[in-house]
Every structure is written in structure tokens, then in C-alpha cells.
Amino acid sequence: MKFNNIHSLKDIINNCKNIVIIPHFNPDGDAIGSSLALHGILKQLNKKSTVISPNMAPNFYSWAPSYNEIIYFDEKSENCIKILNQSDLIFTLDFNDLKRIGDLGDELEKTNSKIVMIDHHQNPTNYATLNFSFPNVGSTCELLYEILLSLDFEMLINKDISTCLYLGIMTDTGSFQYNSVTSRTHQIISRLLDQNIDHNFIYNKVYNDSSSSRLKILGIALNNLVHIKELNTAYMFLTKEDLENSNYKKGDSEGIVNYGLSLKNVVFCAIFIEDLNEDNNVKISFRSIGNFKCNEFANDYFSGGGHINAAGGKYEGSSKKAVDHFLKNIFNYKNKLTQ
Ligand code: 5GP
Ligand code: MN
């Protein structure tokens, strides 16, 4: 890939010493993978690098190289603010709107640091000094690989960094099944495999390391599944009670939404999950196959966004109310869902 601002990025990196890397709230494999990969590169360049995450990722990412060096804004906010204020450069990875990092965004805006956005979501907002915003690339990790190559840092991409990049590409492509996967994606994967990474270990750590609570919650969600045949749509929900009864832990519900798409002809599905710790707060995930734009639907009705085929949003109220709101509006999309 060609980047017209790569020289500016090189200059900024050369001239800065104290660097902070920020992934989005509830970081996923791509956010964690890209943050830790860049962290590894910057350390090799003898920079002082700190990864500050708004909150913790699910436990099934905790094996990632240097994961234990991440610090958490929701746990140590004063320490994080101090590090931010001492920084001269901040990378924001895998998001493009400060709303995605909550209160940490206010602190970021107070600093005088240069800000570099590296992201693949649509509709970037304008907060960064330099933008690397490429919605057509399947993952931030794939984009970061291309940027590292353009910066002439290929020789710094060692086994640990390759492992982090593989993690993000694997998770954000649904293990290489989404439309965003190209021959270039596979070329990059091939180069990462050349670093002797253990791809089987990575897959098993992320997908085959479940606690029984994760499977129980999957069972409850599948039991709650509603198939609206005439709209090629399916939805599921999990109430606070469901989560309490199955000993829910962070990350247990990740990926469940995708099961809706395994139904014949279904092109759109959603899952509504009540917040275990806060009443009247529902998190919604949307997934689609083909042209149906989840991000538009999420934005129009659930204050959210994301990609065409994977988006999220929120609703203030019970999951029942959120589902009612969904049902009130989804029938207007009959043409788009059945074409
Ligand atoms: P997930 O369903 O896995 O939480 O999110 C799917 C995609 O939608 C991710 O790429 C994520 O960045 C985006 N997303 C999830 N929740 C929100 C939200 O509340 N607002 C916006 N703008 N994007 C979201
Ligand atoms: Mn991503």
C-alpha cells in the first residue's frame, strides 16, 4: 500500500520519545493485537512506550505477548493521566471516534501530544494530527503491517509481533472467512507464518479455551433465538438474570451473535445483552451477510456504528424494550432484507 503521509509519520516517530498507545473500550483481538504489535516495535526503537486501555480485555487474550504490560484507565486513572501528560505522541488504534474510549478521550484532548489514528472503521472523526484511516482493509493489524512495511520496519517484525498481528487479522476476519479477506491478506499471513508463529496455539487460545459459563450462555442465547423468516432476520437476547444464573464473565458472550447467520437465508442478526452491573443499559451487536448495512441500522436506531457486516450499538432500557424498538423499525427494511 502507498501512504502519502508516511514521511510525516516517520518524522514524528523519530522526534518523539514518550509514546502512548490506546485501543478502544472493551478491546477485541484486533485492538489488543495491533496495540501490542506497535508497542513491541516502539520498544525495539528504544522509545518509552505504554499501552493504556480504557478497560480490560476478555481473559482469552491474556496470553498475547507483553499483555501484562498493558495498564488500565478504569483501574489506575491517575497514573494513566500522568503518563498521558508526559507523552509527546499518542497512537489510537482500531477506532476513529473518541467516544469509543469514554472518559479517556477527555484526557487525551487535554494533552499537547501529537495524535496518530490507525483504523479501519468507516466515518472517521477529526481528532488526530495524522490519519491512517482505511475502511477497506479487513483489520487494523493488516493495516499496521502495511504501515510498518512502508516505514521500513519489516526487520523489526519478530515472532512476538507477528503473533500479535496474526491474532488481530484472524479475529477481525472471522478466521479468514469475511469479504474483507484478499490475496494480500493471505500474503501478509504467509509472511507472519515465516516468523514461526504457532497459529494453532493462537486459534485454540482464543476459541477453544472456554469456561463452562461461556457455553452455558451460548445455550441460553440459542434458546432465546427468534427467527423472523419473512425478513431473513434473527435475533437473540440475554437478560441480566440469564447472565447471573450462568456465572457470566467478561467475554463470554463474544461471537454468539454470529450463530444467527448460520440459519438458512438469514442475512441479518442481532443480539441484545443487558449490562450485568448497570440497570437499563443494553449492548447490541449486529451482523449481516452481503449488502445489508449493519452500521447504518446501528447508527439510525441504536446510537452505534461499525462496519457494513459487523456493527454495534446501545439502548437505554431493558432488553425487552430494546427488542421492541428493533421490531418496530426492522419491518421497514423488508425490501433490503429480502432482495
Ligand atoms: P461487536 O458487536 O463485536 O461489539 O462490534 C462490532 C463492530 O461494531 C466493531 O467493529 C466495533 O468497533 C463496532 N461497534 C460496536 N459497538 C459500537 C458502538 O457502540 N458504537 C460504534 N460506533 N461502533 C460500535
Ligand atoms: Mn478491528
Image (cartoon, rainbow, N blue to C red):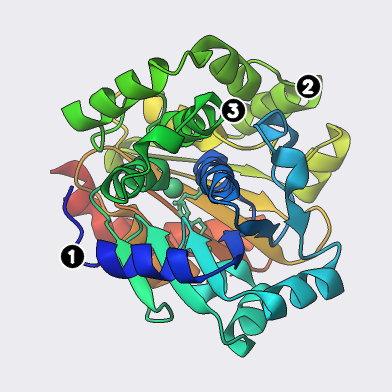
Q: Nearer the viewer, residue 294 or 307?
A: 307
Q: Is mark 1 within 8 Å of ligand 2?
A: no
- Cα separation, mark 3 vs mark 1, equals 47 Å
Q: Which mark is residue 4?
A: 1
- Cα separation, mark 2 vs mark 3, equals 17 Å
Closer to the chain start, of discs 2 and 3, is 2
x then y, percent, for residue 231: 29, 43
What residue is rendered at 64% in x and 74% in y? 87
What residue is rendered at 45% in x and 37% in y? 156
Residue 317: quadrant of the picture:
bottom right
- Residue 182, visible in the rendered structure: no
- 117 left or right, relative to 237: left
Closer to the chain start, of discs 3 and 1, is 1
Q: Amino acid at mark 3?
A: Leu
x then y, percent, for residue 322: 57, 61
| SS type, badge 3 | helix
Q: Nearer the viewer, residue 281 or 98?
A: 98
Q: Nearer the viewer, residue 99 or 192?
A: 192
- The residue to which callout 3 is attached is 222
- Cα separation, mark 1 vs mark 2, equals 46 Å
Q: Nearer the viewer, mark 3 or mark 1?
A: 1
Q: Amino acid at mark 2?
A: Ser
- The residue to which callout 2 is attached is 211
What residue is rendered at 18% in x and 65% in y? 4
Q: Is residue 93 above or below residue 85?
A: above
What residue is rendered at 35% in x and 62% in y? 10
Q: Nearer the viewer, mark 2 or mark 3?
A: 2
Q: Is residue 147 above or below residue 225?
A: below
x then y, percent, for residue 106: 64, 84
x then y, percent, for residue 244: 86, 41
